[in-house]
Amino acid sequence: DTAVSQTPKYLVTQMGNDKSIKCEQNLGHDTMYWYKQDSKKFLKIMFSYNNKELIINETVPNRFSPKSPDKAHLNLHINSLELGDSAVYFCASSPPLSTNEKLFFGSGTQLSVL
Amino acid sequence: GESVGLHLPTLSVQEGDNSIINCAYSNSASDYFIWYKQESGKGPQFIIDIRSNMDKRQGQRVTVLLNKTVKHLSLQIAATQPGDSAVYFCAEMISGGSYIPTFGRGTSLIVHP
């Protein structure tokens, strides 16, 4: 059983399109995240949700909108895709941040904007 | 701003050698550190962690050393194997708050048979 699963694994699309990436975790965690990994492997936090509520929103264009229908899901919607959005996007989950526990990552979604 | 960084972006070793991957951090308030391993096409996976009340922690073939004085931690891998080839990240956290784990750039470990 995959603990953190995200779909799709690969996403190729044209500039200007709108796309979504879905993430689900079956670990019972309260906190979920979206990270962006660039071509140089740098992992940068985008959003963090705790029990369906946004707690962290780093400097991310408002074209990116996370949505958490329940605490097991955190989806990422991207409007008006740009070339610079090409990257690998990772979803992750963990127990509450205050408990200082490790993150569990999904396998990533490789987004290519043409 | 403060950041987590790595000294070496790429490390090449021979199979059977010991590997040492270094990480510098600058947030003196950080008190929990984690090493992750990311294999090609996969997400980062937990390897080992250490809290600031310790200076050394050992796992299976891996050891993490923490030097709070110089804000440095390292990951030592004994008898490196081809399966250890991956990108390794260190991450820092602060207890009790909403501090999101901050990752360094990563070190690519290449193990030659």
Image (cartoon, rainbow, N blue to C red):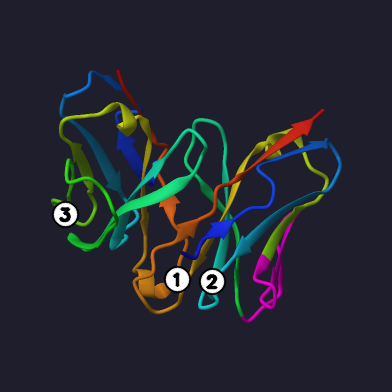
Q: Which type of secondary structure does the marked residue at label 2 adopt?
A: strand
**Residue A7 falls left or right of residue B58:** left
Q: Chain of mark 3?
A: A
The residue to which callout 3 is attached is A70
* Secondary element type, mark 1: loop
Dot 2 and dot 1 residues touching (CB under 8 Å): yes
Q: Secondary structure at mark 3?
A: loop
Residue located beneath label 1 in the image:
A100
Q: Could you give the CA–CA distance between mark 2 and mark 1, rounded to whole angstroms?
A: 7 Å
Q: Which residues are magenta?
A: B53-72
Q: Nearer the viewer, mark 3 or mark 2?
A: 2
Quick check: is B109 in the magenta stretch?
Answer: no
A110 horizontally vs B17: left or right = left
Mark nearer the viewer, 1 or 3: 1
- The percent position of residue B58, horizontal first and vertical second, equals 72, 64
Q: Residue at x 49, y 65 (%)?
A: B2
Q: List x then y, in percent, for residue A84.
A: 33, 31
Expressed as whole percent of the image width and height from the top left, the position of residue B98 reads 34, 71
Q: Is residue B57 above or below residue A109?
A: below
Q: Which residue is mark 2?
A: B32
- Quadrant location of the N terminus of chain A? top left
* Quadrant into which the C terminus of chain A falls: top left
Residue B67: in magenta span: yes
Asked whether the viewer can see residue A1, the reply is no
